[in-house]
Amino acid sequence: MNDAVPAMTVAAGESALALIAERRGTDLLVSWNPESLAIPGAVVGMLFIRDTNATRNLLLTPEQLSYGHMLYAPTSDQVEIRLRVMDASQSTTVDSITVLLPQSSPGHRFIAQR
């Protein structure tokens, strides 16, 4: 008998955590789906943020993960964001995006790519 656990299926263009970033003035609102399958059973999360001038590695508690968002003040026009969530069995779910911000005006829209 096969006791293997089936892998989570994610349709093209979707992600397990639905990580996105939205411009809020000069800041980025980094959001994920707090109702995704990985969040309720999570014991820890790590939010890795890298832009040209800074790298941040933020440890997130299950409570912080359940909020579904965090505000970040970028220091450059290109920001890489990765969210890693781990459950009690040490199974991990990871999502990442790259945000390209306009260099001239903070009022312009940006591009986030998976």
Image (tube, rainbow, N blue to C red):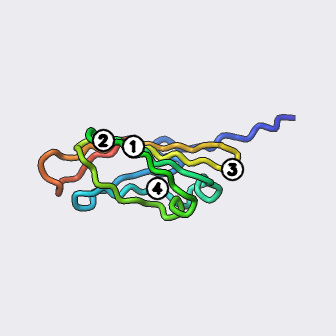
What is the distance, in whole Å, between disc 4 and disc 1 at their CAs? 11 Å
Name the residue type under label 2: Asp
Say if mark 3 contacts mark 4, CB within 8 Å: no
Of marks 3 and 4, which one's residue comes earlier in the chain? 4
What is the distance, in whole Å, between disc 2 and disc 4 at their CAs? 19 Å
The circle on residue 97 is 1
Residue toward you, 41 or 16: 41
What is the distance, in whole Å, between disc 1 and disc 2 at their CAs? 12 Å
Residue toward you, 37 or 10: 37
Of marks 3 and 2, which one's residue comes earlier in the chain? 2
**For the residues carrying marks 2 and 4, which lies nearer the camera in this image?**
2
What is the distance, in whole Å, between disc 3 and disc 2 at their CAs? 31 Å
Q: Disc 3 marks which residue?
A: 88
Residue at 18% across, 53% down: 108
Q: Disc 4 marks which residue?
A: 32
Residue at 81% across, 38% down: 3
SS state under label 2? strand
Say if mark 3 contacts mark 2, CB within 8 Å: no
Residue at 39% across, 52% down: 20
Name the residue type under label 4: Trp
Q: Disc 2 marks which residue?
A: 51
The circle on residue 11 is none
- Specify the quadrant that holds the N terminus: top right
**For the residues carrying marks 1 and 2, which lies nearer the camera in this image?**
2
x, y percent for residue 102: 18, 46
